[in-house]
Image (spheres, grey):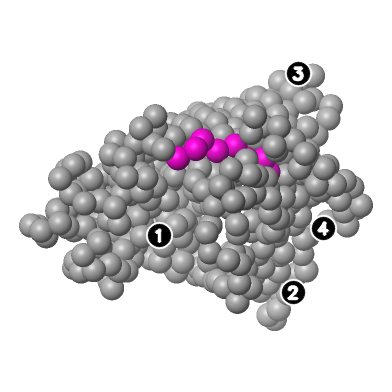
Amino acid sequence: MKIRKIGKYCAPFLALAMLASPLANEAQAGPSIEFGDDGQGILKIDYKAQFQVVSRDTGSGETGDDATNTMGFRRNRLAFIGAWGDMYGIYVQTDYFENTAISTLGQNTTSYDPSDDYFSLIDAQIRIKFNDMAHLRVGKFKANLTRENLEDCYQPLTLDRSKFLAEPFVISRDIGMSLWGNLVDNKVQYKIDLLEGKPAKQVSGNTGDTLGSNFRYSGRVHVSLLEPESGYGYRGTYLGTKKVLTIGAAMQHEDDLVYKNDNKDGAESYNAYTVDLFTEIPVPAVGTFTLSAAYADFDFGDRGLNSDNTLGNDAASNKGGERDGYYVKAGYMLPTLPLQIFGRMETWTFAELNGIMDHELNWMGVGANYYVRNQDVKVTLEYSTVQFDDRDTADDISTIVAQLQFMY
């Protein structure tokens, strides 16, 4: 069985967990620099890393049926956070991306070349706070569509966010402006985005032609029924420090994103919708219970629904194209031990995936977080499976990931 093939690779995961022990007393806040006549200016430097050891039950060997094992940084970031008084701020963050042998739904077939690794400026923001009801964010930032994309990737409940929530032609960040704020004693939050969306010269389909350039618009609102979530982003877990029940909804639109068909008879716009729920309830002497769920629909009009189209390389196809689905994740944290058990499941239907129209995919995972020093030093272990559509000839996938998180 494939699970047996993974079993003999568990030793590195235990070693990774042991590495966290000597780090427990070393993690601390990054350095800060004060400047200005009255010290009203401040610049803080943070380093944040997630190092993973990964074993997948397929992808290697002569027939591709042997396990694939790899290790490296999932995230490797240096951030600069600045403020000038209460009104102005900046946020700049870099990430060092490494080539990996394992992709979301398979293995990378190209050989590893260190020269392919690169630094990227993933965040670059000017922040202006007029008051609690009106903040302005300008630059490169996370678009305000799905809750899980807005959750701090260093404070998740499960190992990582969904692999199927990416907006078309961007991954998690976009360039633009966002107006946001809190109302009704921070119980209601709104966000309105004006974004670059598809770059002006981006190819729109397999024809190699481009459409006109249009901006992308997003709007999001949430209501906190218990303690408020008043920040720009969210957390996947508050580790029992807050009692939270938040309901959110968002939409996104861009005109003329793709051609209507292969003959380029007109254009189709992009629309996305999502609703989500998050709750975390700490119960004294019992533990902390967390539940989060969301539904999302990424729609390309007739382009994604027309089976006469050749979608093989089209923007409406594959895991970043037209799709709809949901995830549910839940967790339980022990009352006297910094151990959190979690599980998640996802079901997605893609307009086309692996050459199969209306492809249904199921993703399931279970695991645990051990908080050596809250989120600053954390070890996570997760086992997950991907089940492809019955019509798909691709083998189902099982993956084990052990991760060490360190923030300084």
Q: From mark 3 to mark 4, how far is it between C-alphas?
A: 30 Å
How far, Cα to Cα, is label 2 from label 3? 42 Å
The tag earlier along the polypeptide, 3 or 4, is 4
Furthest residue to the left? 265
Pointer 4 residue: 28
Residue at 56% from the left image edge and 34% from the top image edge: 385
Residue furthest out toward the top: 286
CA neighbours of label 3 inside 10 A, class few (<14), some (14 to 19), many (20+): few
Q: Residue at x 64, y 58 (%)?
A: 75
- Locate residue 146, reporting x and y percent: 43, 44
Q: Which residues are magenta?
A: 394-401
Q: Residues within 10 Å of mark 2 (few under 14, many from 20)?
A: few
Closer to the eye: label 1 or 3: 1
Q: Nearer the viewer, mark 2 or mark 1?
A: 1
Left or right of residue 95, residue 347 in this image = left
Mark on residue 286? 3
Mark 4 crowdedness (10 Å alpha carbons): few <14, some 14-19, many ≥20: some
Please tell me whether mark 2 or mark 3 is closer to you in this view: 3
Label 2–label 1 contact, CB within 8 A: no
Q: CA distance from mark 2 to mark 1?
A: 34 Å
The numbered disc on residue 170 is: 1
Picture residue at 35% right of the left edge, 55% below the top: 168
Instruction: Give the structural element (helix, strand or loop) at label 3.
Output: loop
Mark 2 and mark 1 lie on one chain; the one further toward the N terminus is 2
State the SS at label 4. Answer: loop
Left or right of 200, for residue 31? right
